[in-house]
Image (spheres, coloured by chain):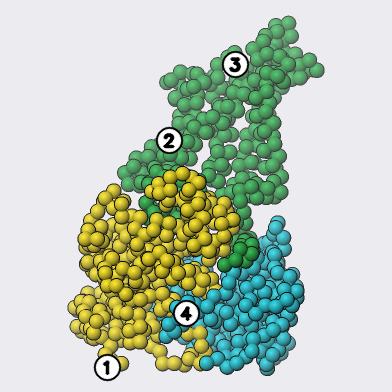
Chain colours: A green, B cyan, C yellow
Amino acid sequence: MSSDILKNDIRPDDELSLQIGERDGIRDKLKRMCRQNPLAAVSAIVILIFILMAIFAPIIAPYGETEPDLLNRLQDPSLTHLLGTDELGRDLFSRMLYGSRLSITIGILPSLISLIIGVIAGLVAGYFGGWIDYVIMRIADVMLSVPSLLLAMVVMYTLGTSTINLFVALTMTGWSSVARVVRSHTLSIKESEYVEAARSIGVSKWKIMFRHIFPNCIPSLIVLFTLNVPSAILSESSLSFLGIGIKVPFASWGLIVNQGRQFLFTQPWLCLAPCVAIMIIVLAFNFLGDGLRDVLDPYMQR
Amino acid sequence: MDDRNILEIRGLRSYFFTEKGTVPAVDGVDIDVPKGSIVGLVGESGCGKSMTVRSIMGLVKYPGRVVEGSMCFDGRELSGLRENELRKICGDDISMIFQEPMTSLNPVMKVGKQVREALMIHDRSISRAEADKKVMEIFEKVGIPEPEKRLECYPHQLSGGLRQRVMIAMAMICRPKLLIADEPTTALDVTIEAQILRLMKELRDETGMSVLLITHNLGVVAEICDYVYVMYAGRIVEQAETFELFDHTAHPYTRGLLDSIPRIGGSAERLHTIPGVVPNLLHLPKGCAFCNRCGYAEEACHKAGGELMEIRPGHKVRCIKPLETEVKA
Amino acid sequence: MSREILLRAEHLYKTYKTGKKGREVHAVSDVSLEIHKGETLALVGESGCGKSTLGRTLIHMLPATAGSVIYKDMDIAAMSDKQFKPYRSKMQMIFQDPYASLDPRMTVRDIIAEPLETYKLCGSREKTTEAVLRLMEAVGIPGEFLNRYPHQFSGGQRQRIGIARAIALRPELIICDEPVSALDVSVQSQVLNLLKDIQKDYDLTYLFIGHDLSVVNFMADRVCVMFLGCICEVADKDELYAKPLHPYSEFLLDAIPIADPHRRNRKRKVISGEIPSPMDLPKGCCFCTRCPYATEECRSIRPELRDIGGRKVACHHPLEGENR
């Protein structure tokens, strides 16, 4: 066969596959998402801005994180203090910038760790099946059956309140949903012909899991990750608000809300500003997750 | 419209509007289905044959759209009809059966009930007992063994052949004037295929309905069709009465398809092949769509595609240099 | 053709347990057959007759329930996965669905290189790529498509990639599991020709699983007809097509649609009835429920595979003279 014939190799083999864009690469799909769902694209930009602001907080922030200025307590927003000051005279805008570092880290890092644990657990459970599957999935069921915030609170109470323990608590609640998704994918991909082909060649089990099955789960995992992050951010905020998360004098958005709540009726911005920040980033992640799911998740495609 | 035809398609164009460009899936197709005949529409995957029937039934989905064309069914124009009017005609006088019966049957409803509902929607005055009796009759007619037992089955409890028979029963119960069968036997085994083909032929002889049969298998065409349309890259490339087409094949593509089929009894060392693949409809060659794969292509073929020309009575070919039509040995 | 036996199955059984009530599905029951070196043995039958299961059981892709598979005087059916590993590379497979058998997230290079890398046959990465290019040339995929993904190819080209992967390890036996049934006619003939060429060039033995008897007619040297997990008939291709001895073989042959309208009114026998459930096999001959010639004997005693004029038939009343 000569090569010029092969030039026309992408053909609309079946109208349906063309219709759902199955033949697109991941980059094409992202482009399509930006076009079809501008909200998701805007959300991605918002998230990026938040992350950049968190990274460059020391440069952007006009004041220090824990720098008290008792002469300027409870100031209204002004040009010198963009969002005013709290009861110790700390600049709220600066505190929120620093707080975003913790809040966003705590949103992303435990989600990432739980993603890794969940992927391994799900792959092993799905691929080997039998009692291994049973044990792993029952543990995951237990984790899912306890309200995640309650579980995190129990962990924080028993292990003590520290940032590391907060990570542990949030990871514990996050991995089980990942494991479930990965397991179900593994079960179906395990039966596919290309995995059978790999077995017929003699590729080892672990290699099949990580070279063939895992890469085909990635689209769903991206979606799951973008939906897990906001829930972790919310959990952290709730825990900090309840006083069992981040400790003063460090700042996280939940903690700032907690400290600002007593001035809700006199200086409402102390409380509302971090609330709005939480709301924006959580919504942004959710919109992005929805947008990604529409283009990436094979089960969502019409 | 000719009175002898139950369906007349004229200049049908259905395109997909994708981000990569406009895909002319069906590009100016004319088809006549005479009353009481079985018409075959043959082609390889991606040639637009499924899109053609979906256009008739108003089932083209986004981003596809019927761009133009007239579809005249039994004196009525189908294009331009509103959704519910089209549904009414499709339910009453046109029935369709699909390749994979499992996906077209409701998995959580007993098959007997599904067929009965199809009937009762069509004929609202019929009583339930009467409908049940009719379902029974049709099950017997399409050759379902032990019909009383099968009525109570769910689709997954039936084998592929039986499911296809249920689909045919459902399609036939409203006594349609036209049955559109989209690859009805492709998913079935040869022995079952032979049964289903025989059944369709018998039902045609008995009820006088017309059949538009979509298939990729020229063997199936040779077995039951009266008239054949060969489709390639969204266009009809050859059309003729079945015997005429097989005896005096004029288009190189049709010839190539026929020669590619391994023949029983022949002990050829190699099979004839058509080189290359079906062209991408986004980047069709400038001339004849088949020119890159055609063994007879000349300068002129790459420059301009031919129009459908009548080379013998009732035999039309889209080729500027049709094959010598010697009688096949 | 040499008569050296490459692989021999003896009284092979494969049963699956179904979830409900511990019932068993007999996918393969009491199959004995030989595959000669260098030949193409076709396994034909309708869907669900166990031909794919048999193919996979023969090359240790599925564990056999009972019986043995002899390869080089060793029973590979009794081996553990670890013991079998050295022989794995000698027996490869080509799959039915070219869209499902290639990992969508790997490039053509990685797909074809996978067997080479698994057995560390080429040493460096560059040498592996060279070997991949040679394989691609052998199956007619231009080398410039090395870094493309499967979705950028058409069905026939994908099947060529699958073939390149299967021959990468220089196997002796390749199980072709309906390799062309998902392809269009014009592409099908390209792939069939390629399979024949490759067989010559690489000295291969094929077990060709198929349901299309016209394709089988082109590919096979010998044909083994299966029904419901049992072998009905094994014969040389020409003999079988000229004169089937088992009633089921005859029905299969008669059912093939022929692309010649002048023969549409030929005398053909159309079988009635459906395939019985493999969960409760008939006591006697597995074909007796559909066989028009079945007698009391057929319903009660299962026929053994016996020699009739150099062919093997499992039937009490083979089609000779009186039944025709």
Residue B328 at x, y percent in the picture:
55, 91
For the residues labelled 2 and 1, say whether their Cβ atoms are less than 8 Å apart.
no
Identity, as a three-letter code, of the amino acid under mark 3? Phe
Which element type, helix, strand or loop, lies under badge 4? loop
Which element type, helix, strand or loop, lies under badge 2? helix
Q: Give the residue at mark 1.
A: C321
Is B43 placed above or below A186 here?
A: below
Upstream in sequence: badge 3 or badge 2? 2
Identity, as a three-letter code, of the amino acid under mark 4? Pro
| Whether residue B40 is visible | yes
For marks 1 and 4, give the CA distance.
29 Å
Q: Give the residue at mark 4.
A: B262
For marks 2 and 1, give the CA distance.
73 Å
Question: Which of the two residues, C197 or B2, is positioned nearer the viewer here?
Answer: C197
For the residues labelled 1 and 3, say whether their Cβ atoms are less than 8 Å apart.
no
Identity, as a three-letter code, of the amino acid under mark 2? Met
Q: Give the residue at mark 2.
A: A143
Subunit under mark 4: B
Q: Are marks 4 and 2 on the same chain?
A: no
Residue A224 at x, y percent in the picture:
54, 41
State which quadrant residue A83 falls in.
Answer: top right
For marks 3 and 4, give the CA distance.
79 Å
Q: Please state which of the two labelled residues, at mark 3 or mark 4, is closer to the viewer.
A: 4
**Horizontally, is A212 left or right of C285 in the view?**
right
Q: Please state which of the two labelled residues, at mark 1 or mark 3, is closer to the viewer.
A: 1
For the residues labelled 3 and 4, say whether their Cβ atoms are less than 8 Å apart.
no
Q: Give the residue at mark 3.
A: A250
Residue A40 at x, y percent in the picture:
67, 42
Q: Please state which of the two labelled residues, at mark 3 or mark 2, is closer to the viewer.
A: 3
Which element type, helix, strand or loop, lies under badge 3? loop
